[in-house]
Amino acid sequence: MKRTFISTLLLIAAISAQAAEPWSVERCMKYAADHSHSVRQKQFDLDENRSAKTRAIGTFLPEVYGSVSAQMNFGRAVDPETNAYTDVSTFYNGYGLQASLTIFDGLQRYNELR
């Protein structure tokens, strides 16, 4: 039993040793670059700079605001003609759209873009 266990273990070790292939210099460098913390940090910095540029370009666009509102009222009221109670329900709705564009801000947006 002990002998078969050791022979099986040696067989598995031999198979795994044959399955390992040597790495080329290019593959080692690619692996190091992909798993380097400084390279990842530079990629994050590059992404942040791209988003800052997109935000700077977006400051030249107008700001647009929209709103929708609704209100429902119900209750009883006195009819002035018949002097009797009537059930009243009203529905109000409103829509709004507003846009604004800064004409001059002392070239602040232009400097942010640069």
Image: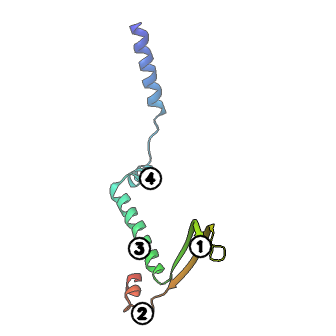
Disc 2 versus disc 4: nearer the observer? 2
Res. 52 mark: 3
Whether residue 20 is situated above or below residue 4 in the rendered picture: below
Quadrant holding the N terminus: top left
Q: Tag 4, which secondary structure? A: helix
Image quadrant of residue 39? bottom left
Secondary structure of the residue carrying numbered label 2: loop
Mark in front: 4 vs 1: 1
Quarter of the image for residue 85 reads bottom right
Q: Which sits earlier in the primary sequence, circle 2 or circle 3? A: 3
Q: Earlier in the sequence, mark 3 or mark 4?
A: 4
Residue drawn at the location 63% of the way across and 69% of the way down: 84
Q: Disc 4 marks which residue?
A: 26
Q: Nearer the viewer, mark 3 or mark 1?
A: 1
Image location of residue 24, percent across then percent down? 44, 47
**Mark 3: secondary structure:** helix
The reply to whether the C-beta atoms of the residues labelled 2 and 1 are less than 8 Å apart is no
Find disc 2 in the rendering and name its residue. Answer: 104
Amino acid type at mark 3: Ala
Disc 2 to disc 3, C-alpha distance? 21 Å
**Residue 47 against residue 61 in the figure, above or below:** above
- Report the quarter where the C terminus lies: bottom left
